[in-house]
Structure formats: structure tokens, C-alpha cells
Image: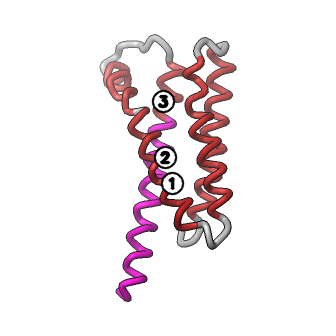
Amino acid sequence: MVGKEPQFTVITGALLIMISLLSGVLSGFASVTIFIPAIIGALLLALGWLALTPARTRTMMHLVAVLALFGMLGSLNVVPALIDLAAGTAPSSMVSVVARSSMLLLCGGLLAVCIASFVRARRMRAGG
């Protein structure tokens, strides 16, 4: 994955946008909160695209990490619904649970990729 973090960010952003749109269609656009993954996704897509320019990569990827952290923390509210689902209780909206779980996983994965990249870059600068 070395050097592919901006591309991974663009793909993650596009996936979040698609999840948001699909969730909206499946739920009949019942709530404006369905667009939260699309907003995060659009920002990630833009930052990832800007990070493709070598002079901007470092700054943009730090912004990506912050946004991924916010996306992950913002979707942690799905955990109680997942626990209820595992216990056999049906959630009020399965579409919402899947969308929030997807956002949690995608943002968490992107944050992990960013952290690994930052650690690798620091080790390379330190000569180790």
C-alpha cells in the first residue's frame, strides 16, 4: 500500500457516497442524516484527489486522517444497534444500521492506513 494512500482515500470517499445514495433510495430518503456519509465521502474524495499532488500529499493526508477519525467516531453510535441485532432484536431501520456500520468500517480502515503510513514515513525520515 506504500504510496497508494491518496488513491485509497478517493476510493473510500466514493464508496461512502455510493452507500449514502443507496441507503437513501432504499429508505425513501426518510431522513436528511442519510447524507452524512455522502458529505464525509465527498470531502474525503476531494482531499484524496488533492493529495495526488506530491507537494500536497502530507498535508492532505493529515486532514484525511482527522476526517476519518471524525467519521469513525460519529458512526460509533451503531454499536448498540449491532449488539441488539446480535441478541436477536430487530433494529428499527436495518438500512441505517448497515450504512452506519459501513461508515464505521470504511473510516476506521482509512484511519488505520493513514496511521501506518505516518509511522512508516517517520521511520524512513529517522533512517530506521
- Residue 77 screen position, x and y as percent: 37, 27
Q: Which residue is mark 1?
A: 63
- Residue 19 screen position, x and y as percent: 62, 33
Q: Give the main secondary structure, helix, strand or loop, of the magenta stretch.
A: helix
x 46%, y 60%: residue = 114
Q: Amino acid at mark 2?
A: Leu
Q: Which residue is mark 2?
A: 67
Q: Are marks 2 and 1 in contact (CB under 8 Å)?
A: yes
Q: Amino acid at mark 1?
A: Leu
Q: Which residue is mark 3?
A: 100
Number of callouts in the render?
Answer: 3
Residue 89: within the magenta?
no
Q: Quadrant of residue 21?
A: top right
- Label 2: state its secondary structure: helix
State the residue in front, 55 or 9: 55
x 50%, y 19%: residue = 94
Horizontal placement of 56 versus 80: left or right? right
Marks 2 and 1 sit apart, C-alpha to C-alpha, by: 6 Å
